[in-house]
Image (cartoon, rainbow, N blue to C red):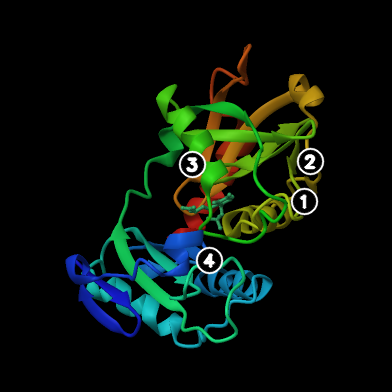
Amino acid sequence: GKVYLNGNWINSKDAKVSVFDRGFLFGDGIYEVIPFYKGKAFLAKEHLDRLKYSLKEVELNCDISNFDSLILKAIEMAELNEEDGAIYIQVTRGMAPRTHSFPENYKATILMYAYKTDLSGFQNQFSDVLVSSDIRWHRCDIKSVSLMANILANTEAKKAGFAENIMIRDGFFTEGSHSSLFFVKDDIVYTHPNSPFILPGITRNLLIKLCKENNIEIVEKALPVSELNEVTEVFITGTTTQITAIKNLHFPDKDIKIGNEIGSITRKLQHLFSSEVK
Ligand code: PDD
């Protein structure tokens, strides 16, 4: 397929980046993943606003004013106008001799492409997750391509047979390696407040809105691990996760079962979410 690289649509096998690109040398870059359903980008503005925020927070200068039209083009170039999938966007700080500090003048490297992925069937999943300690840096609100902690933890989960891991920092659940995290306790939905310790998930934000519009009580408060025994439902959300119900939590020393079937609040939110994307 074709990818967009620095202004041109080219065959992916011809798309090359310098070994001196700071994205390659330092992981000095920002990314976004935008879902599309039947060829239609979902919450694109929210994703592009978050991209702008991430770029600003790391002082990465890049004009993204044409990205809203580029993402439509990406779907078209991949011939996915009738399909479900995602658009991957990456902006790095470009090419420079290797020094930690970045130069004043640089030309950002921009990569974008659309790919097909299965965004249906999440309602039938009832997944297990590994519980990992959150060893990420203190700016998880920035969607940085430096994802070492996330990939190590998620690979451990995959090896144990689970698709996702959820993380604990200082006795509180934060989020997944690539998803946001929700708990239900006393019929109240809990999720970590936006802070430097989580990514402000676009799907998370939609879920909060859906709760508020449908009289489901939602509290943006981190759940202490010590209160897990009071939890009746757990689910994770994200661009590629939608709303996936969690059945078992696997700690290094014990397994905690959440329920025998997907909980009623999770079900309700899955239905509300499905009508949003249709
Ligand atoms: N990940 N938290 C983290 C750490 C994430 O990486 C993601 C998304 C989310 C969910 O955010 P959203 O609802 O905006 O997709 C939460 C993307 C999909 C990825 O890394 O591939």
Residue at the disc numbered 1: 193
Q: Position of residue 142 (x, y in %)?
A: 63, 61
Q: Secondary structure at mark 2?
A: loop
Mark 4 and mark 2: span between their CA atoms? 26 Å
Q: Secondary structure at mark 4?
A: strand
Kind of residue sitting beneath label 3: Ile
Mark 1 and mark 3: span between their CA atoms? 23 Å
Q: Secondary structure at mark 3?
A: helix
User: CB atoms at circles 4 and 2 under 8 Å apart?
Assistant: no
Mark 3 and mark 4: span between their CA atoms? 16 Å
Q: Position of residue 42 (x, y in %)?
A: 47, 66
Mark 2 and mark 1: span between their CA atoms? 7 Å
Looking at marks 4 and 2 on the same chain, the residue that comes earlier in the sequence is marked by: 4
Looking at marks 2 and 1 on the same chain, the residue that comes earlier in the sequence is marked by: 1
Using residue 198 as the reference point, say whether residue 99 is left or right of it: left
Q: Residue at x 28, y 83 (%)?
A: 8
Task: Report crowding for label 2: few under 14, some 14 to 19, many 20 or more residues within 10 A (C-alpha).
Answer: some
Viewer-side residue, 248 vs 51: 51
Q: Nearer the viewer, mark 4 or mark 2?
A: 4
Residue at the disc numbered 3: 151
Mark 1 and mark 4: span between their CA atoms? 22 Å
Looking at marks 3 and 4 on the same chain, the residue that comes earlier in the sequence is marked by: 4
Q: Which mark is residue 30?
A: 4
User: CB atoms at circles 2 and 1 under 8 Å apart?
Assistant: yes
**Do we see residue 34 in this rendering?**
no
Q: Position of residue 69 (x, y in %)?
A: 40, 84
